[in-house]
Image (cartoon, rainbow, N blue to C red):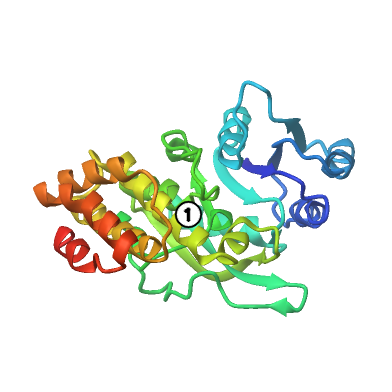
Amino acid sequence: MISIIIATYNRAAYIAETLSAIQNQTYGDFECIIIDDGSTDHTDEIVEEFVNNDERFIYLQRPESVPKGANFSRNYGYTLSKGDYVKFFDSDDVMLPHHLETSMKYLKEGNYDFVVGDCINFNETGLLERPYEIDRTTAELTAMRFADFKTAWITNDLLVKREYADKISFLAGLKDQATEYQYNIKLLLLTENGFLINEILTHRRIHDQGIVEMAKKDMNVFKATTADNFLATVDFFKNSGTIEMNRWMLASQLQLNYELASSRVMPEKIWKTTSLLVKFFGMKGFLYPLAIAVTFATGKGYAIMKYIRS
């Protein structure tokens, strides 16, 4: 059985289409666990129609003992799941009818630990671009290649065996509530025995209420969100990830923080960043607070930043 886990919040406008597409999958051996993160619209009325008519759907409100946030809800939903295979899915996106069947076919026939479908963005005007335009026939399945975006996928794309899903979870509490970035790096450090399915299996909805789209409306918010994700990921993998991977993410975070400081936006978590820079770049990491201060005041701290990450 496949466990499909969905965290939702105020998605009354979209979730019926999401759940209908799951209900009509050509592969029917699944449970779909929906965790509501405290919706204030009529999401509950819509979801309960599916629950009342199809025992494969389970709907629960996030308990008070679980902190608010999509990734806390995902992790909580996972603790309730029973399937041998696991798929997290977003409550505003749409599975194509053969999504589960195709994923299971490749996973079982290739004896893989995980498989990854492809997806394409869409909005009210029709289909758009793919989220990641990579060559899926040549992309390498390694933690480093995922970290530097040479290989990439979104939450919806992944189907993973439970024995590996048991060993990882979503890192909650970040500005970027998706954080499939660190989740998939964890997976790839456990196993590289996966396969990229070169076929569109999901339509990913783009709308103004999407977290990434809202951040992109203010590029400083988007940069701060991305920098926070890099920092949290390095902090998590500082003792388990490769030096190359952690140095690359820190260098990328420095570039983003330089751009923020140049725009007179003070980056957050300066001392945590400094400690990680010292760990991976040596004593010159202590220059980071000075570099930020100079950049914030004059816009001319790039030379120091470049030296730190050299």
Residue 28: percent from the left, percent from the top?
72, 48
196 horizontally vs 48: left or right = left
Q: From the image, tell me which residue sits under label 1.
A: 225
Residue at 23% x, 57% y: name it.
Answer: 291
160 horizontally vs 14: left or right = left
Task: Give the farthest residue toward the top.
Answer: 65
44 horizontally vs 282: left or right = right
**Front one among 282 and 293:** 293
Mark 1: which amino acid? Thr
Q: Note whether residue 295 is visible.
A: yes
Task: Give the farthest residue toward the front.
Answer: 297
Residue at 33% x, 43% y: name it.
Answer: 190
Vertical placement of 193 versus 45: above or below?
A: below
Q: Quadrant of residue 303?
A: bottom left
**Front one among 70 and 209:** 209
**Front one among 240 and 211:** 211
Mark 1: secondary structure:
helix
Residue 181: percent from the left, percent from the top?
44, 53
Residue at 60% x, 66% y: name it.
Answer: 217
Q: Where's the N terminus, which quadrant?
A: top right
Residue at 24% x, 65% y: name it.
Answer: 301
Label 1 crowd bin: few (<14), some (14–19), many (20+), radius 10 Å? some
